Amino acid sequence: MNELAITVIGRDRPGIVADVAEVLARLGANLTDSTMTRLRGHFAMTLICVGPAAADVEAALAPLAAGGQLLATVRAVTPDGATVPAGEPYVMAVHGADRLGIVAAMTRVLADAGGNVTDLSTRLTGSLYVVVAEVDLPPDTAGELAGRLAAAAADLGVEVTLRPADPDLL
């Protein structure tokens, strides 16, 4: 079996998820992980599936992309296999006035401490910018990291919180 990473992007409309899922089901592709969102009227979906060859999936998705309304890409990926959680799960939330470089600065602090962003969402509402990131942190680093995040946030004029993630909610 092949493991594939598939992305689909384009103008949002009803039925995109159903259209893609039906194509994959007809091919016998099993969806193992996926995420989908709307970004200012645009649809974006990334998924991992196990099943047929990448070329077969590309050909089957081609009619959905006809006319340039959607862009679908398919790439074979190497399965990760069984993995042990890399660190302690935390949630970082940042909010404040919108300005250039918030995500870059805050995620750089995380990366420099060995943190791994596992999920990230941003939203601009008027002039308020909000970032919510699920992160895995090396054991026993959250206390020091919270101070470094607070310093970076102060430089940006935003607020930050770092709290343990509730595993029942992730």
Image (cartoon, rainbow, N blue to C red):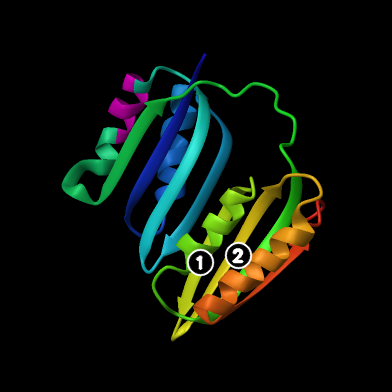
* Residue contact between numbered discs 1 and 2, judged by CB atoms under 8 Å: yes
The amino acid type of the residue labelled 1 equals: Thr
Q: Identify the main secondary structure in magenta.
A: helix
Q: Is residue 63 magenta?
A: no
Q: Residue 100: image x %, image y %?
A: 39, 72
Q: Nearer the viewer, residue 27 or 123?
A: 123
| Towards the viewer: 95 or 30 | 95
Residue 132 bears which disc, if any? 2
Q: Is residue 55 left or right of residue 162?
A: left
Pointer 1 or 2: first along the chain = 1
Residue 164 figure quarter:
bottom right
Q: Is residue 125 above or below residue 139?
A: below
- Badge 1 is on which residue? 122
Q: Amino acid at mark 2?
A: Val
Q: Give the vertical position of 155 relative to 119 (above or below).
A: below
Start-end of magenta stretch: 55-61
